[in-house]
Image: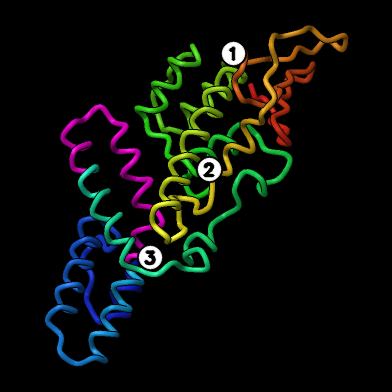
Amino acid sequence: MAGFWRAIGIIGPAEPDHLSALLGLYASVGEAVAAARRPATIAALRRVQETLFSEHLWPWLPGHLEAVTDLPAPALSGWAGLLRRVIAAEAARWPARAVLPLALRAAPPGADAAGHDAGLREMAVMLTVPVRSGMILTRHGLALGAGSASVGHRIGERRFTLRAMLEQDPAATLGWLAAEASRWQRRHASHSAGDGQGAGGPTGPGGPARSCTSRPAPWPRCRPRRTGARRCCPTPGAEITAVTLNRNQTFLVAGFTVLRRS
């Protein structure tokens, strides 16, 4: 982000990617457009403003604001709701882009492309990185998820908390993750449908976490297997993949072989 400030000839602040700095820059460029008189200057400033919005604000800000509205903080929720309406109005000003922003095109692989073998640590890391999972798991959200899955809530970094939840009850935790991924997928779809930008949130067109946590095939109950393994099943009707715990303490999760570590 610091490079963008330099490219337009402005010495950026100490935190060039801070939201307040980005919004202030966007507003300042808009004021410069209104004050400019030469057509070439106006066109150049408009390109700067459009690039700032499409490349550095819209790809992540809608999802960020959705996560803020989930927090039990009315003051923050009100601010996030107001800003969400403002950026939705700004998104309608700019033409739709045929490609994803550069940051999303260069993002690390999501769940589908992360590989078939992933340990619990790697899976927890992936699911807590919005650009890879398509959702923002806050500490508050994980606390609610632990309650929903009836597992202990280990306080610490988010990836540590999520890994502890997966270790305690993989089926229940994945059931909650599947529902959470579906919720974020609907959020991204609503952004994409109403803005014309096509970004749709922290992962652009979708939420890859859903593919690694769920599929539309509920299992009604848990049945012992002759091999000694057991199939862990979520609440009837929940959209979640089969999770198998075999003799080697290995979780098989929708194409992932997740090794349980002691």
Image coordinates for residue 65, horizontal then vertical, percent: 31, 44
Image coordinates for residue 107, horizontal then vertical, percent: 53, 57
Q: CA distance from mark 3 to mark 1?
A: 41 Å
Image coordinates for residue 106, horizontal then vertical, percent: 54, 63
Residue drawn 52% across the image and 27% down it: 179
Image-quadrant location for residue 39: bottom left
Residue drawn 42% across the image and 61% down it: 197
Q: CA distance from mark 1 to mark 2?
A: 23 Å
Camera-near label (2 vs 3) is: 3
The amino acid sitting under disc 3 is Ser
Q: Nearer the viewer, residue 148 or 246?
A: 148
Q: How many marks?
A: 3
**Mark 3: which secondary structure?**
helix
Label 3 with label 1: CB-CB less than 8 Å: no
The amino acid sitting under disc 2 is Ser
Quarter of the N terminus within the rendering = bottom left
Please name the residue that numbered disc 3 is placed on. 54
Label 2 with label 3: CB-CB less than 8 Å: no
Please name the residue that numbered disc 1 is placed on. 235
User: Residue 74 lies in magenta, yes or no?
Assistant: yes
User: Residue 182 lies in magenta, yes or no?
Assistant: no
**Mark 2: which secondary structure?**
helix
Image coordinates for residue 244, horizontal then vertical, percent: 74, 20
Please name the residue that numbered disc 2 is placed on. 133
